[in-house]
Amino acid sequence: MNGKTVHIKSFGCQMNKLDTALVNSALTEAGFSLTERVKEADVVLINTCSVREHAEQRVISHLGHLQHIKESRPDIVVGVIGCMAQRLGPKLLEHEAVDIVCGPAQIHQITKLITKTLQQKKETIAVTEKIRQRTDENLPLEDFESTYGIGCGQIQAQAYVRVMRGCDNFCTYCVVPYVRGPEVSRPPEAIIDQIRKLADSGVKQVTLLGQRVNAYKHTSGDKTYCLADLLRMASDIEGLEWIKFVTSYPSEEFFEEILQAMADLPKVCNYLHIPAQSGSDKILRAMNRHYTAARYLEMLDKARAIVPDIAIAGDFIVGFPGETQTDFEATVDLIKKSRYKNCFIFKYSPRPDTTADKRLADDVPLETKKSRNTELLAVQEKISDELSAEFLDKEVKVLVEGLSKKPHLDSAKSDGNPQLIGRTETDYIVVFNGPKSLTGQFSKVKIAKTSPLTLFARLM
Ligand code: 5AD
Ligand code: SF4
């Protein structure tokens, strides 16, 4: 026990949540204790996201807040980790509040950096100099991942398991390839071994993570493994009950094999998150997405043919450079035809160094981005509402995640039990009253009321 206390605040995607969990485990093992409260912390880490400018602005404003705290507590150490750390590197150290900068490909160094800063009272930094270069630096990273990816004894029902790092797709709007580096698929043995350990410690569901998880490909000996192979191997693990994977890129490669695995293997959840980003072929080309709207819809048809009760989710960007009203209408049309369970819609945000930012003017006015965003949300809300309504009076199995953070007023009438939140196999959020002890367990509930994004239920 080194006696120092750490607080971590995490922004961004599931990759970041996983990195935060890994850092938590590593620091706990090194003798740090974790705290939910900044006030009690000797070290404050912020795990950051660069995918949109807004995400970065939130971090900057949080740093301002920490700088204020530092005025009365100058000894507090502040570290920035994650995508912004890699993107901005030494520039972040110029910020008054920041003592440590550590990129996502360097998180295996985090304990070392914190210890050094605490002991020597000096700033430390670890970012990858040439992030797009494939180097042996992956070895310590892989080691870190398989050591701390097993949750350090914390019993949780759900765990993320990274199957690949980085991205090679270079969608023209996206900063990910520049901050998370080239695509590297982890060895299947390491992944399966990690899932087995998680299952042994009580984990019931794993979510396999990759920027393009369906592009997973690893050659070991004379066999090349794809995601469908991983799903089959993970399905054999005793104790594990549900397997989800995100995010899928609309590509033909392995597509049928993966869907067939989903259809064949009861543990593989019938859920696919497969962003289209736009419904206009012109915009898709400008985004460097390698499909047309028609090909994309054919893929969804195929998915629904192979896995009839599959739930599909998507992402769209509105206001990409050059998006005309006609292009936008093509997106509305694609959303209507896709019948997503839910959809994330983003306003285009130019990211430094990306091809779109370098070559294309951000020429769609903010007002237009906002109104297109609102319009798409409304179209999707109606579809989500119709699909949710099909659950009414049905019995479903949910994995209980815990207490609902923002209690919903319209849940079934209170019976003295707290409000719990769980998820179905197809990733629907279900809210119901029940004892807290159900956390981490599967429960049978009956849907009593539905809304576009949430199902309300009674415990059976
Ligand atoms: N601007 C707006 N949205 C973006 N996304 C990625 N990059 C940008 C950007 N520059 C969205 C995409 C992706 C999701 C994670 O974030 O829709 O699927
Ligand atoms: Fe970004 Fe495209 Fe890679 Fe997804 S597939 S991380 S959107 S570059």
Image: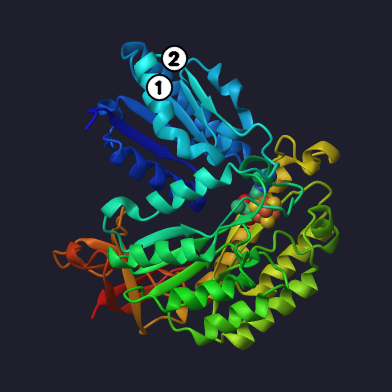
Kindly identify which residue carries mark 2. Answer: 122
The answer to whether residue 372 of the structure is visible from this angle is no
In the rendered image, the vertical position of residue 418 relative to residue 340, given as above or below:
above
Residue 125 at x, y = what percent?
52, 25
Residue 28 at x, y = what percent?
29, 40
Q: Secondary structure at mark 2?
A: loop
Q: Is residue 184 left or right of residue 361?
A: left
Residue under the point 40% across and 20% down: 117
Which image quarter: residue 104?
A: top right
126, 314: nearer the viewer: 126
Kindly identify which residue carries mark 1. Answer: 116
Mark 1 belongs to which amino acid?
Answer: Lys
Residue under the point 74% across and 50% down: 170
* Upstream in sequence: badge 2 or badge 1: 1
Residue under the point 40% across and 41% down: 23
Q: Which residue ends up furthest to the left in the rendered image?
A: 416
